[in-house]
Image (cartoon, helix red, strand yellow):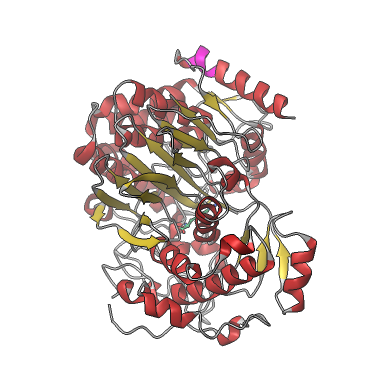
Amino acid sequence: MQRIIKARLFLKINGFVLITGLLLSGCAGRPIGNNNTADYRNGMVVSANPFASKVGLDILKKGGNAVDAAVAVQFALAVVYPNAGNIGGGGFMVYRSATGVTNTLDFREKAGAAASRDMYLDAAGAPIVDKSLYGQLAAGVPGSVAGMVAAHAKYGKLPWATLLEPAILLARNGFPLSTQQAGELNNLREKLLQLNPDGTALLKDGTWAATELLKQEELATTLELIRDQGRAGFYEGRVADQIIQEMKRGGGILTKTDLQQYQAVWREAITGAYKGYRIITMPPPSSGGIALIQLLKSVEPYPLRRWGFQQDSTVQLMVEAERRVYADRATHLGDPDFYDVPAKALMEDQYTKDRMKNFDWSKATPSSVVKAGKVNAKEHEETTHFSIVDKAGNAVSVTTTLNGSYGAVVAVKGAGFLLNNEMDDFSVKPGAANMYGLVGGEANSIAPGKRMLSSMTPTILEKDGKLFMVVGTPGGSTIITSVFQTILNVIEFDHNMQQAVSAKRFHHQWLPDVIYTETGAIDSLTRVKLEVKGYIIAPRGPMGRVDAILKTKQGGYQGAADPRGDDQWLGW
Ligand code: DON
């Protein structure tokens, strides 16, 4: 089986060599079992797609730093991973320099100026589900291009054009689809036809086959404009006109002013501690960082290591922490530029301790009795994550998304890129669940110019003041719990990076009151012990695709790519 996977990748990569002239050197890695203990000294790139990882590695080898590589990978993913890689979406970057300076970049989409609180409700006040999920009206103002420009301006070393070139080549000349990608595009055919009556590069006569080349000429031209004009190549001129035309075609509301005014924002990282490790993670408008710190603090006083990996006490404790933290998320978290998020209060030691006080080992706490805590201060799915470390030891952790798989499923005519459907991440009505079953209220209500709340949790860990781990994942509401589990797998259960990533996952998000499990995540005895206490356990498909890097004791980097997708690590 492993041999088949390797052979297919080899063919794909050979195809890439023929097309683009880039060479793949020996240190390729795909998650082969749980045995990835190799150690690379000069740098590492882990992303959802082998071509994108290769683009990142080449940039590192050319002398680019981790931010240069991240910019190149972001644009490459927009081509080779169109379900989530994007220029029409947004995301978050967490940065830690080799000397320990930290920063985060928020390039999350924003609601357009014409957005309004009830824009996705019918006359009776009920949410019209598809309205925030498909079509032009589902899109927020894209942030990715502004984000990459801002990241490059602050930290980049190589020329901007060098970072765009590989993506342009891949778009213009094409790349071979993986089996998973061909299947996804075929499944999406009806929706693509319906929402793109004039066609898109993602549609063809007949069905897509694995290894078939996907060429995206229009996208290549758009990327060339971005290469030559920077942010103006996207937010002004021809591409901006094409976006506005697309809005007119499908009842969207974004305007030229919305595009021109969009700014990515540098924000101070959220930091916290767990048993001697320092966690550096994303502040609001992502909920991920605060929730991750809350989760870690909630379980810190307990002997997880003694209980063991995925044993009943371990699972029960983690689930009870998750239930409480997601209840807090629903009430307290939103765009900090619009809502006073009580970040400090939510992460205080005493607060997390108090939140866990009413938990009873003998039975499940029903979610119906768990409300958001009172804080003292006022204050189908696709996304993708990549982790990068460069030769000097600078680290970048980026999670980026269109929200749902292929976003709003609308490609901007003539410009060849997909629009996001990020507006669904707002709470369209208090208490109404979004596509991930997440509920929210006032903190995350729709307002013009506001950023929708995210779960994305790009994170970097330090130990003894030195880089320890770079981690993150897609997965909608399961992002936070997947990052949480991956960190605990390494720190508490002595997994190597690949074991921690490959391990089966479980998830609880307060509502619905269910523990979702991947097949094999919980053994039958543990399951019975939990069910007797009143926990409802339900199977779910794969959760997340964690792409992570661990700094080893020997001083090298150990990559881990999630076997749930086509993900790949490459080191040198
Ligand atoms: O920002 C968020 O939390 C969501 N838009 C992320 C979507 C996602 O992870 C879908 N992927 N699997």
The mark tally for this picture is 0
**The residue stretch that appears in magenta:** 15-19
| Residue 306 position by quadrant | bottom right
In this view, 568 is above or below 448: above
Give 163 or 220, whichever is nearer the viewer: 163
Give 161 or 258, whichever is nearer the viewer: 161
Q: Quadrant of the N terminus?
A: top right
In this view, 494 is above or below 7: below
Residue 236 visible in rendering: no
Q: Position of residue 447 (x, y in %)?
A: 33, 70
Q: Residue at x 68, y 82 (%)?
A: 363
Q: Position of residue 319 (x, y in %)?
A: 59, 70
| Residue 130 position by quadrant | bottom right
Dominant secondary structure, magenta: helix
Extreme front residue here?
306
Q: Residue at x 48, y 28 (%)?
A: 570
Q: Residue at x 55, y 33 (%)?
A: 37
Q: Position of residue 294 (x, y in %)?
A: 43, 69
Say left or right for 145 vs 211: left
Residue 547 visible in rendering: yes
Give 354 or 514, whichever is nearer the viewer: 354
